[in-house]
Amino acid sequence: MIRKKVITLALSTTLLLLIINILASNQPSASACTIYLGKKVKFDMELSPKVPLFHPEVDGYLYPGRPKITKYLKLINVGDLPFRICRINASFSGDIYLATGLQIEILELGKGRGEKPNLLYNGTLIDLGEGINVYGKRAVPPKESVTLQISVWMPATVGNEYQGLTVTADISITVWFPPSHDGIKC
Amino acid sequence: MNRKILVGVLAIGLVALAVGWGTYSQFSDTETSVTTFSAGSLDLTINDQNGVPVTFSWNNLRPGNQPHYSLTLKNIGTIDGYLDISKIVVVSEENGLTEPEIEAGDTSPTEGELDDVLGVMLFFDKYKNDGTPGSDGWYSSGDVKIFDGYVADLPSTGFNLNELVPAGGGIDVVVEIYNWWKTPQDNQAQTDTLSITFTFLLSQNP
């Protein structure tokens, strides 16, 4: 009888621990300070520049066949843990239809000269709205950075339907820890 | 014995928790960059009319007349454009044969002859007669000639002008001067009607 109680208690405890484990893994893991291995660490990333990356007052108007407009966005590791880029998505306001006529290419640049850039995305701007999971090539240590080269253009094949439209796209970059390629989706 | 079993199971659970935590836990951070994209526009107006044909008419035209019209073409879009005349349609109608037309040798009951006797000069009116920049409606030194000949010889495919018209209100003035100088066939054009339609095209590439 006692033996049965012990086994039941043991199984219940194991089940409880597993439930706690699963709940913990589903917690929203924001950039706030988190207890990691008993030490208080910060997982945080900043973008540079902080001003809008593309703007018609600076870059002019897009039109079919215009050469690509290329900008650089730096992801700076201001935390205590390495990170790797894992997701890119965009949200839109204004004339969202314009996003169907724009192409965007996002490259993760290499650290040194001659290192081949890593293509993270090449497609229409509108498709970024659904978000895409990507695998950053580099694990970026604390206090270091990785640069994204972002090019936008309007293909020569599009027509008058896009004339005069303006769209604002908030492009979000998500980085994650652990920085290894172990198949876990961020 | 039971206590040992309990401790053992608890230990297994704790190990599972630790391993599981290491496997599932992850930190992430998302930052957003705001971007704004604007597509340019090309929009051509003629004499401040947008999307509406600009029409001129001249009645009772006769030898010695020299009607002339100025077309002010404006790019009210946001990107520079290049102006062409993409199409010219000439419709010459006989409107029946009068006695003077027949006596002058006009034998075609449907085909008018006004386009054969009426000359036209098209040019960009860039300078006034006194040499200062601007338009005065007449051909002066410095103006850019597009065509000078008979209406019948106007090409239906128009003219590839590649004339740059800057964005935001850039202006170009095209003048049409028609000349009916005396010719032996003048009487054949009596009562004839002539319609000329110029289609202007503003495009982003030359």
Image (spheres, rainbow, N blue to C red):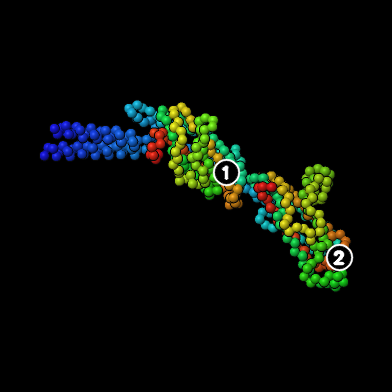
Is residue B187 positioned above or below B201 on the image? Answer: below
Q: CA distance from mark 1 to mark 2?
A: 59 Å
Q: Is residue A141 visible?
A: yes
- The image shows a total of numbered marks equal to 2
Which residue is under mark 2? B185
Identify the mark at residue A153; answer none if there is no mark.
1
Q: Chain of mark 1?
A: A
Is residue B134 positioned above or below B20 on the image? Answer: below
Where residue B106 sits in the image (x, y, percent)? 83, 70
For the N terminus of chain B, which image quadrant? top left
Viewer-proximal residue among B130 and B8? B8
Kindly identify the residue that appears in the image at 55 percent across and 46 percent down. Answer: A102
Q: Amino acid at mark 2?
A: Gln
Q: Is residue B129 left or right of residue B14?
A: right
Kindly identify the residue that appears in the image at 53 percent across and 48 percent down. Answer: A100
- Residue B58 occupies which quadrant of the picture? bottom right
Q: Is residue A93 visible?
A: no
Assess disc 1: are there few (<14), some (14-19) or many (≥20) residues with their C-alpha within 10 Å of its C-alpha: many
- Classify mark 1: helix, strand or loop: strand
Assess disc 2: are there few (<14), some (14-19) or many (≥20) residues with their C-alpha within 10 Å of its C-alpha: some
Q: Chain of mark 2?
A: B
Q: Is residue B141 left or right of residue A66?
A: right
Kindly identify the residue that appears in the image at 83 percent across and 46 percent down. Answer: B141
Front of the two marks 1 and 2: 1
Kindly identify the residue that appears in the image at 61 percent across and 46 percent down. Answer: A65
Where residue B143 sits in the image (x, y, percent)? 80, 47
- Residue B127 occupies which quadrant of the picture? top right
Q: Are marks 1 and 2 on the same chain?
A: no
Where residue B200 sits in the image (x, y, percent)? 70, 54
Q: Amino acid at mark 1?
A: Trp
